[in-house]
Amino acid sequence: MSEHIDNRGKQASNRQERQKILKEIILQLHDGKDPGEVQQQFASLIDGVAASEISEMEAGLIADGMPIEEVQRLCDLHADIFKGSVEEVHTASREEERPGHPVRVLKEENFAVTNLIKGSILPMIHKLGTQPTVKERYGLLEHINLLMDLDKHYSRKENIFFPYMEKYGITAPPKVMWGVDDEIRAMIKAFKVLLQSDETTGESLKKAAEEMTTKILDMIVKEESIMVPMLLDVLTEDEWLAIAEDSEEIGYCIVSPEDRWMPARQTGNETLTEAAHDGMIRLETGFFSVDELTRMLNTLPFDMTFIDQDDVVKYFSQSAERIFPRTKSVIGRTVQNCHPPASVHVVEAILDAFKSGRKDHEDFWITMGDAFIYIRYFAVRNDAGEYLGTLEVTQNIKPIQAITGEKRLLSEEF
């Protein structure tokens, strides 16, 4: 078998043959073969694997029926095998090296995270005794709270970068990476719980820290050696500008851009289509200018998002107090791709109930810090009862729950 693969590998002179080899690597891992043995076997066969080829391979596995979760698990293994072998794919421009460019911001954040892990967290972990002291635990807790800032880094990736990858047909890596992001979020939260327990041993903390930091550092490799080259290969200057502008909405991890990036040659943002035109928007019960309607919707004390009958995000409001982050890059994206793989089945169940007519609305409520979030979904139908789309309304109802008695007079400061 190995001789057959070796001969075929040496003769692999086109992308199709290389795809066969790449898939065979992953399928051997899937069958339980030792990663070290696989790496040694294929080291001489795979020279300069392109990031796009890994993406194509992952998409092929998913298309062949392999669950996303399994591809996600194997992703961790094949990252080590391909590490250092993925060729750098760059555009002719080096705009991505300028201060404030989304790629430079991402890499600066990754550097800060790496420095936090290798320069502070791991050294403190390695010094722990059998039973960590209160001072040691709280010292680590301070750094872990800073590490939780990774949520912003991942949120920008999932809500801004991934839509553009999907736009250009790069669909498998976003699904796999989002699942790993969620695993890392959960690991950081679990580690924080361990730190806050007096019964946690130093050995338990060391084991959990090793697993958590390894997964975080591996994700940094995947972002910079796979995701970034893919994006640099396809995105236009105007799309990078839109990403930079949308990034402000979500925020940054540990460090912020040292400057606001503006392209050396700016032709305007051609990626955002104007939804407005001169004149009035006329409805059955009145009419508005585009500015009036926009500001009225943004003044409502809740967030609204609308998806059409094809599950495509068409609109979201921008109220003063946002509950969940939204960026303009989600417009035109399917709602399924706006949610982590683990929760897509819930979205599908709601939409199926709406489309079939079994339900017209569904409600959820969750606690987020001091807020009590009420999330409502409504089926939008025409006069004939035909499904046109779904409206999501999200509101912090904690202040409403606190209302008692009556108020019949104006406030004194009015």
Image: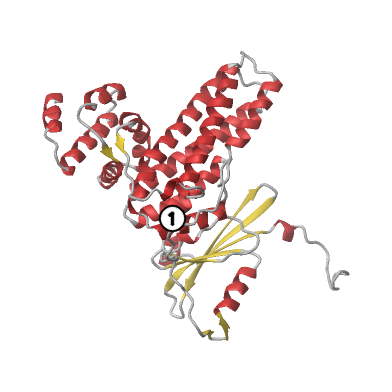
Q: Secondary structure at mark 1?
A: helix
Q: Nearer the viewer, residue 345 or 144?
A: 144
Residue 225, image x, y percentages: 37, 38
Q: Amino acid at mark 1?
A: Trp
Q: State whether residue 104 is above or below residue 365.
A: above
Q: Nearer the viewer, residue 18 or 193?
A: 18
Residue 63, image x, y percentages: 27, 47
Q: Nearer the viewer, residue 97 or 412?
A: 97
Among all residues in the image, which is located at the extreme top? 130
Q: State whether residue 411 is above or below residue 209.
A: below
According to the picture, the residue beneath numbered tag 1 turns out to be: 240
Q: Quadrant of the C terminus?
A: bottom right
Q: Residue at x 57, y 61 (%)?
A: 376
Q: Residue at x 69, y 18 (%)?
A: 133
Q: Residue at x 42, y 32 (%)?
A: 218
Q: How many marks?
A: 1
Residue 79, picture quadrant: top left
Residue 411, image x, y percentages: 85, 69
Q: State whether residue 328 is above or below residue 294.
A: above
What crowding class fits label 1: few (fewer than 14 Cα within 10 Å), some (14-19), or many (20 or more)? Answer: many
Residue 45, picture quadrant: top left
Determine whether, in the image, residue 164 is placed left or right of residue 210. Answer: left
Q: State whether residue 205 is above or below residue 90.
A: above
